[in-house]
Amino acid sequence: MKVLYFHQHFSTPQGATGIRSYEMARRLIERGHEVCMVCGSYKGGTTGLTGPFVQGKRRGTIQPGFEVVEFDLSYGNADGFLKRTLTFLRFALHSIKLALSENYDLVFATTTPLTAGIPGIFARWLRRKPFVFEVRDLWPELPRAMGVIRNPFILWAMSMLEWLSYKSAHRLIGLSPGIVDGIARRGIPRAKITLIPNGCDIDIFHGSSAPWRPACILNTDLLALFAGTHGKANGLNAVLDAAVELQKRGRTDIKILLVGQGALKDSLVEKAKNMDLTNVVFHEPMSKSRLANLMASADVGLQILANVPAFYYGTSPNKFFDYLAAGLPVLNNYPGWLADLITEHECGFVVSPDNPQEFADALEWAADNRDELLRKGRRALALAKAQFDRKSLSNLFVDWLESTCTLQSNNSNRELTK
């Protein structure tokens, strides 16, 4: 079958963002299918296309069976709300045209943004194509809980789009237990929903032969690494508060490295400077291969989010699974399904939200108990291999799409013979 795959923020491993869609597409191709990936130009991402845009898009094959259509729609996490919204809507409009004109057997769309589902809705109802919708975050539940969007009309419109996307999809994928539950609360039968969380790219992150650290971080220092977006949802003020506590305690041997970009990065850098935090280092985003080499020299991975209850079971952060794949113990600062995993498998630390003393205590323990820290890291890698290996999860993904296409084809044949 040929899959028309919509992911606005798609990137290959050469980019500095998640590669779930890249790996899922590759597995489809390995199992004999074709993929046409439709995306925008995500800052920090790399689509694999280098030619010029012609009439607002460029198109090419990046691997045999793997075609990419990239719209000239730049997007970054630091963009303002209005700019982001307009970019989302423009992408949806361009995508509808493709959904109505391309030759394909199944349409697949993944959030965020929620508007990614719009071409799938058109494909389902106007072309009667099988439609699978992947939900990475519950919208508008998360922005409402964070207070990012307060306008009741916008929230209502997003809620209606969410409902229509779910109802239009023949099947759905949720990336966390809370997301699966959230889809079901909208009246979708459980049989139409499956859980396929983000996965661990063990081949990329484990066994690096070229570990490195920024020059200002000594090899003897405990290195706690955060690699991800610096935005409101990430709650990185909690990291700076812990750094203050560590500095008060005189733990100059513990360094925190924040890698990434986002709307709040400049303010975080300024805050750390004003607080004279010599134990916090900021770094620009980097490719997966370079990040893997950095993780090979790190001691702890930081899984940090703002203390919003909707996050507890309703997110599936890439960085958490990257840490596991690298064999890094994970320090998590909020309750939920990831905290439960860490506790059950003894592969890191779970600290209370908004508690810099407890956060600092965990890092001090890590610095003072290196042998046990290594054992936690080995358990993290074991968990990655046992439950979250990308290869296994991508096979489940392909199975789900194949069976959806077969089921809808059989249903259509039965209707024709009536």
Image (cartoon, grey):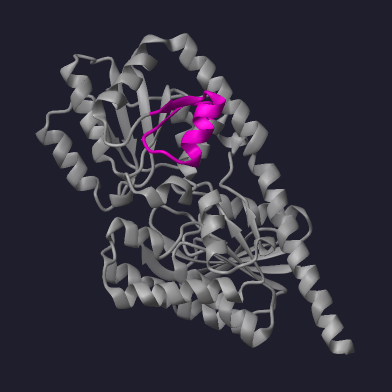
On screen, residue 371 above or below 66: above
Give the quadrant of the C terminus.
bottom right
The answer, for residue 214, to whether it is visible in the render is: yes
The one of 345 and 2 positioned closer to us in this rendering: 345
Q: Is residue 275 left or right of residue 80?
A: left
For the residue pair 336 and 201, the one nearer the viewer reads as 336
Q: Is residue 59 magenta?
A: no
> Residue at image x 53%, y 16%?
375
* Residue 337: percent from left, percent from top: 50, 41
Q: Position of residue 405 (x, y in %)?
A: 76, 69
Number of numbered discs overlaid on the protein picture = 0
Above or below 313: residue 127: below
Front in this rendered view, residue 404 or 59 = 404
Q: Position of residue 214 (x, y in %)?
A: 33, 27
Task: Look at the image and give the residue range highlighted in magenta.
Answer: 326-350
Answer above or below: position of 191 versus 296.
Answer: below
Residue at image position (50%, 34%) is 340
- Look at the picture and state if 254 lies above or below 342: above
Q: Is residue 411 left or right of residue 176?
A: right
Q: Is residue 298 visible?
A: no
**Residue placed at 40% from the left, 65% from the top?**
140
Given the current orientation, which residue lies at the most extreme left position? 274
- In-image side of 285 versus 372 (left or right): left
Coordinates of residue 28 in the picture (x, y in percent): 71, 57
Q: Residue at x 27, y 60 (%)?
A: 147
Quadrant of the snapshot with the N terminus? bottom right
Taking the view exactly as shown, the residue that stands out farthest to the right is 417
